[in-house]
Image (tube, rainbow, N blue to C red):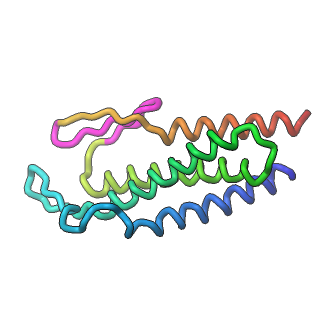
Amino acid sequence: MDLKGYYAYVSIISSLLTLIFLSVFPLVPVGDEELAGISPTGVHYNLSLPVGVSFSTFLALMLFFISIVIFYGTKSTFYNVLIDSSGISFVFLNYFNYYLIYETWKPEIMILPFLIEITFNGAKTLVIDLGQIVLIVILYRTYKMIRTNKS
């Protein structure tokens, strides 16, 4: 299969996986009463959207980890499409989740290499950005596919 056809399949499957993961949003394992937060400024936040997308992102990450551990190095097009599309789905959901966090709390978010620094009400936290790591893995796999197809 040529690379254009392969990545056409990857984009279609990653879009479907993203929709499937977002459809499990109502299955978030927390009650609605517990998803309301009050900030130190007294503002009431509805946390159901960021928590639901975070749960969907976690499921996409687990699919990517499981598929890459089990199927990495296989010659099967199906398994390679599954690895790449689950990774792209995770990267999209990961940064969509950070966008929702920003829209909910309005913190300062600074993207660093492999880290994200979030500052809210004077408190700073560093979070490992798995989206960047997965993106590097996907880009490496793409580079490897292009290099093997040329020779």
Q: Is residue 57 left or right of residue 65?
A: left
Q: Is residue 128 left or right of residue 10?
A: left
| Residue furthest top in the image | 113
Q: In which quarter of the image is residue 126?
A: top left
In the rendered image, the quadrant that contains the C terminus is top right
Residue 73 on the magenta segment: no
Look at the magenta stretch and give its main secondary structure. Answer: strand
Along the viewing direction, whichever of 85 and 3 lies nearer the viewer? 85
Residue at (74%, 35%) from the top-left corner?
143
Residue 112 on the magenta segment: yes
User: Total label count?
Assistant: 0
| Residue furthest front in the image | 70
Residue at (8%, 56%) from the top-left corner?
42
Residue at (26%, 60%) from the top-left corner?
47
Q: What stretch is highlighted in magenta?
A: 109-122
Residue at (79%, 39%) from the top-left corner?
145
Residue 43 location (% of width, % of height): 12, 59
Residue 41 location (% of width, % of height): 9, 52
Residue 5 location (% of width, % of height): 81, 57
Along the viewing direction, whichever of 111 and 38 lies nearer the viewer? 38
Q: In which quarter of the image is residue 24?
A: bottom left
Residue 78 location (% of width, % of height): 75, 54
Q: Is residue 34 left or right of residue 60?
A: left
- Looking at the picture, does residue 117 appear above or below residue 33? above
| Residue furthest right in the image | 151
